[in-house]
Amino acid sequence: LIQQELSRVSSCVKIWYYDTNHQSNYALQLREDVIYPDAVVEGTTITAAAPVTKLLDINGKLVCGDAWGAIRIFELSSSQGSSEESNNNNAISRRQCAFLQFGGGSSSIACMEQVVGKHVLLAVSIEPAVERDSNSRMVYPLATSFRVPSPRGVYIVDTMESTVKAVLDNVHNDTVRGMCSLPDGGLLTAGGKMDATVRVWDSFDFDNASPLVKEDLDGATDEMQVVTNSKILDQPGYVFDLKVLPDSNGSGVYAVAAARYNVIKIVI
């Protein structure tokens, strides 16, 4: 029972709602909420959803990635009303607006990043899922399924259309653990320890790509739009995280801060 409870809790996301317009020195906490993903039902067997591995905010939408390669996107909204209504549980609602899965349960979500551009794009890094046994791959029947030609690739997803526009092919020698969107629409990807490189991708290569067809019941056979053009930066090498530092004078020039062990490197 304890193991089942731990499995259930690890697949949940807890949310705290706050009212920043409240007239006090502190934001007013409205309520708490817990998202319980749907379990997988196979015949008479019910399996809890996979553990959540990554969270991301995209324009006010909550994006949740899990260990079976699934991505759920939730819209959060609040109703306007009196203070009494604001404290009511019904004043805030959420709706699942997208449900995707990569690799039919054979992949896990390693990293996610919003891509700046003319479309709402999501960069998703995946890695092979940890299999407990030969029957441990779990497929979500209600999810839009995408095949995975590159087991450690980065997939550019159009969240509005629930389509994959392109895959940044596995030029890294390890799973991409960090990503950073650039002001010009490009993307930085940072490989793990076995790769120790940071690559830069031009937005033109994937922002104008044709969407990929969703996987059908027999498995998709369409050729994917694969992008391999990237440049390895001389610095900073292996990093834990990347962030853009824009010019405070608004010149359009920016630098990239990279967390590397006990130092932060600035690349201009």
Image (cartoon, rainbow, N blue to C red):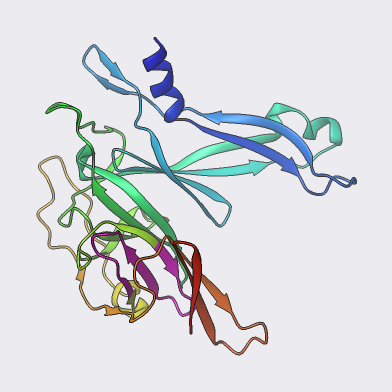
Asked if residue 54 lies in the magenta stretch, the reply is no
- In the picture provided, is 130 more to the left or to the right than 90? left
Image quarter in which the N terminus is found: top left
Examine the rendered structure and indicate whether residue 86 appears above or below residue 181: above
Q: In this orientation, does residue 42 appear?
A: yes
Q: Is residue 67 above or below residue 213?
A: above
Query: Could you tell me if residue 79 is visible in this image?
Result: no
Quadrant assignment, res 251: bottom right
Residue at position x 17%, y 63% in the image: 224
Considering depth in this image, is 149 or 223 the residue closer to the camera? Answer: 149
Does 191 appear in magenta? yes
Q: x, y percentage for residue 62?
A: 52, 46
| Residue 174, x across and y down, in percent | 23, 59
Q: Nearer the viewer, residue 267 or 224?
A: 267
User: Which residue is pictured at 32% across the width and 75% down the height?
Assistant: 208
Q: Nearer the viewer, residue 242 or 209?
A: 242
Residue interval drawn in magenta: 179-199
Taking 29 as reference, is 177 above or below it? below
